[in-house]
Image (cartoon, rainbow, N blue to C red):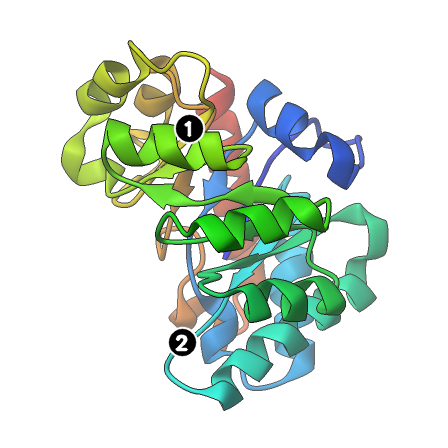
């Protein structure tokens, strides 16, 4: 799951997603829906995140089987049904043009990938959606941007460190980047100071244990903690 934060009372228009993200955003990288068996659970997670300040949610594709990929699409639809225009829904781990089309048909407004796939980026832009491919090196980041990416996801940011983000941004100031991987409440602000427009976090925000036990209020509280940390 990935999330973009903007001022709580504002709705996100897909056409201005990048601008809203760049102005005040963070991304949450997790997989709570994979461990949630029913539609009510999926909706409850999304509602808990939205209540905590999240208004842009992305659900990741599970590439291990077609059936699990279908679950991703069902989750996107469930969130759209439950929250409507309160959140902007996207798809993650998008690795083929077919998945771009499937996600768009389900209601996704942006595509996030773990790699730089030119065909995926160009098809995403052709369909007037937001493209956020994953990269590690300056070469990959620059190529992704040349292909049309709106934002480039730098991974694994937590292992590389904020200093790495700062070094990459030095010659690539024109490319918006997010820091994803091993990011938490304590260090998230460091990546923004280093030049990232957002960060990605995983189980530290949404864990399958919290979802299974129905502790959605704790998910809301953690989301608020990230918002506060990034606003400092």
What residue sits 40% from the left and 76% below the top? 63
Give the image location of residue 154, x and y in percent: 32, 36
- The kind of secondary structure element at disc 1 is strand
Q: Position of residue 81 (x, y in %)?
A: 82, 67
Residue 41 versus residue 25: which sits nearer the camera? 25
Which numbered marker is on residue 213?
none
* Residue underneath mark 2: 63
Look at 36% across and 14% down and name the residue there.
193
Residue 191 percent coordinates (x, y): 33, 24
Task: Please tell me which residue is depicted at 44% across the width and 63% down the height of the picture.
Answer: 95
Residue indicated by mark 1 = 177
Horizontal side of residue 218 vs 157, given as left or right: right
> Is 27 placed left or right of 115 in the picture?
right
Few, some or many residues within 10 Å of mark 1 (<14, 14–19, 20+): many
Q: Is residue 204 above or below residue 103?
A: above
The answer to whether 135 is drawn above or below residue 95 in the figure is above
Q: Is residue 7 above or below residue 12?
A: above
Q: Can you tell which quarter of the image residue 77 is in?
A: bottom right
- Report the residue at 24% width, 43% height from top: 156
Percent x, y of residue 113 = 43, 53
Of residue 29 and residue 116, the one placed in the foreground of this image is: 116
Instruction: Say whether residue 12 is visible.
Output: no
Cα separation between marks 2 and 1: 25 Å
Return the disc, 2 or 1, that comes first in the chain's sequence: 2
Q: Does residue 78 appear left or right of residue 196 in this picture?
A: right
* Residue 11 visible somewhere in the drawing: yes
Q: Which residue lies most toward the bottom here? A: 67
Q: Secondary structure at mark 2?
A: loop
Crowding at dot 2, Cα within 10 Å, few <14 / some 14-19 / many 20+, comes out as few
């Amino acid at each position: 799951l990935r999330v973009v934060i903007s001022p709580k009372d504002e709705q996100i228009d897909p056409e201005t997603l990048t601008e809203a993200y760049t102005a005040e955003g963070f991304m949450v990288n997790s997989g709570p829906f994979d461990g949630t068996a029913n539609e009510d659970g999926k909706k409850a997670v999304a509602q808990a995140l939205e209540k905590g300040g999240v208004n842009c949610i992305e659900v990741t594709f599970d590439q291990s089987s077609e059936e699990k990929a279908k679950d991703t699409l069902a989750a996107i639809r469930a969130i759209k049904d439950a929250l409507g225009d309160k959140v902007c829904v996207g798809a993650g781990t998008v690795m083929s043009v077919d998945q771009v089309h499937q996600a768009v048909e389900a209601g996704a407004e942006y595509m996030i990938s773990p790699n730089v796939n030119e065909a995926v980026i160009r098809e995403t832009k052709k369909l007037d959606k937001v493209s956020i491919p994953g990269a590690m090196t300056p070469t990959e980041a620059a190529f992704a941007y040349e292909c049309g990416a709106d934002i480039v996801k730098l991974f694994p940011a937590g292992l590389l460190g904020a200093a790495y983000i700062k070094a990459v941004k030095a010659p690539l100031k024109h490319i918006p980047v997010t820091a994803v991987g091993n990011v938490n409440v304590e260090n998230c602000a460091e990546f923004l100071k280093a030049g990232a427009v957002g960060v990605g976090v995983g189980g530290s925000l949404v864990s399958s244990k919290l979802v299974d036990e129905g502790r959605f209020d704790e998910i809301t509280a953690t989301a608020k903690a990230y918002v506060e940390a990034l606003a400092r």
